Image (spheres, helix red, strand yellow):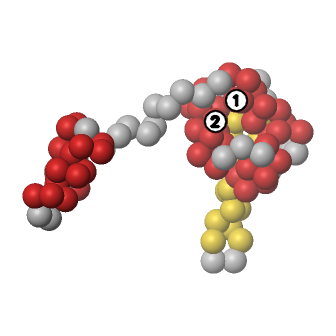
Amino acid sequence: MNLSTVRGIYNNVGAEKCQSLLISKSNKPKKDTDARPIKETTIDMIAGLIKRHKSPTRRTVIAKSYLSPSTVNNAIRILFERGAITKNRKEVGSGCEVSYSIKKS
């Protein structure tokens, strides 16, 4: 980059963003995406879908909930950590199909 390009970027985006653009990608710190907040109502909705559809797959839960896959994945992970759901694995052809069910207490 020449000096005029750097000054143009610096003036448009600011000092902090310009410095982050100059740092190589291997040195940038990675964001922790595992601990993102999620509403309890969303978790309850996912649990209700799993209860209603007996043993749905992740793809079914995503389709029925109309939520993003990352939100559904986080909700399923939280429910699994709480011990509210169980994973059921079934060998299908060369792959493995995972379905979920509510844990009976």
Left/right placement of residue 47 relative to residue 30 reads: right
Return the residue nearer the eye: 32 or 80. 32
Eyeballing the image, is 51 above or below 41?
A: below
Residue 101 sits in which quadrant? Answer: top right
Q: Is residue 99 visible?
A: no
Residue 18: percent from the left, percent from the top?
Answer: 22, 45
The residue closer to the viewer here, 84 or 71, is 71
Which residue is identified by label 1?
A: 43
- Give the quarter of the image for residue 26: bottom left
The answer to whether residue 104 shows anywhere in this view is yes
Q: Residue at x 45, y 37 (%)?
A: 34
Front residue of 70 and 22: 22
Q: Are marks 2 and 1 in contact (CB under 8 Å)?
A: yes
- Residue 84: percent from the left, percent from the top? 69, 29
| Residue 74: image location, x then y, percent | 58, 38
Query: Residue at image x 50%, y 32%?
Result: 36
Three-letter residue code for mark 1: Ile
